[in-house]
């Protein structure tokens, strides 16, 4: 990787990128665990109520939870793929790796931010749903 071709504002060291990967992986693992809790709560609502409105809400959140699990898996895959690229570079260039700039993973940053925002929105919607039907 030639740092001369990377704009200054887009340069990052490998350690910084690695730290982001670890933080995001932990966040996504937490979200996946939280999703499991939400699924259990949704099952409780489904058992206690059987109105048409409630069933529509349950189905809506089931679909949302499936989609969010898919997005989590996609993000984890992409984070792991980028981490693998960094590891491969480190193996091939063990001396230079500490002094080499890499392109910032702006796309992953933006996707994680968008996911965080959508997660917060889904969480608020689900809490409103639970307060109505529990």
Image (spheres, rainbow, N blue to C red):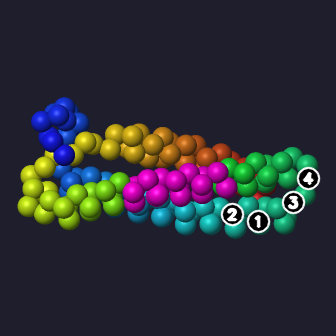
- CA gap, disc 2 to disc 1? 6 Å
Are circles 2 and 1 on residues that touch, CB within 8 Å? yes
Q: Quadrant of residue 118?
A: top right
Say above or below: 17 vs 117.
below
Mark toward the start of the polypeptide (4 vs 2): 2
Mark toward the start of the polypeptide (1 vs 3): 1
As helix, strand or loop, the secondary structure at mark 2 comes to helix
In this rendering, position of residue 1 left or right of residue 119: left
The numbered disc on residue 51 is 4
Q: Residue at x 62, y 66 (%)?
A: 36
The numbered disc on residue 49 is 3
- CA gap, disc 3 to disc 4? 6 Å
Residue to which mark 1 is pinned: 43
As helix, strand or loop, the secondary structure at mark 4 comes to loop
In this rendering, position of residue 100 left or right of residue 109: left
Are circles 4 and 2 on residues that touch, CB within 8 Å? no
Q: Which residues are magenta?
A: 66-81
Q: Is residue 76 magenta?
A: yes
- CA gap, disc 4 to disc 1? 14 Å
Q: Nearer the viewer, mark 4 or mark 2?
A: 2
Say above or below: 112 vs 10.
below
Q: Nearer the viewer, mark 1 or mark 3?
A: 1
Q: Residue at x 37, y 44 (%)?
A: 109
Residue to which mark 2 is pinned: 39
Say above or below: 123 vs 37.
above
Residue found at the very far front of the displayed protein? 92
């Amino acid at each position: 990787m030639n740092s001369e071709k990377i704009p200054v504002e887009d340069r990052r060291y490998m350690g910084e990128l690695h730290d982001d990967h670890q933080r995001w992986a932990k966040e996504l693992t937490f979200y996946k665990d939280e999703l499991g809790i939400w699924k259990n709560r949704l099952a409780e609502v489904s058992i206690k109520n059987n109105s048409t409105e409630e069933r529509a809400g349950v189905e809506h959140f089931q679909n949302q939870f499936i989609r969010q699990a898919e997005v989590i898996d996609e993000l984890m895959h992409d984070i792991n793929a980028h981490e693998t690229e960094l590891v491969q570079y480190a193996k091939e260039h063990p001396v230079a790796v500490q002094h080499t700039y890499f392109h910032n993973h702006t796309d992953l940053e933006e996707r994680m931010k968008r996911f965080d925002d959508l997660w917060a929105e889904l969480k608020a919607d689900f809490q409103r749903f639970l307060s109505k039907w529990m």
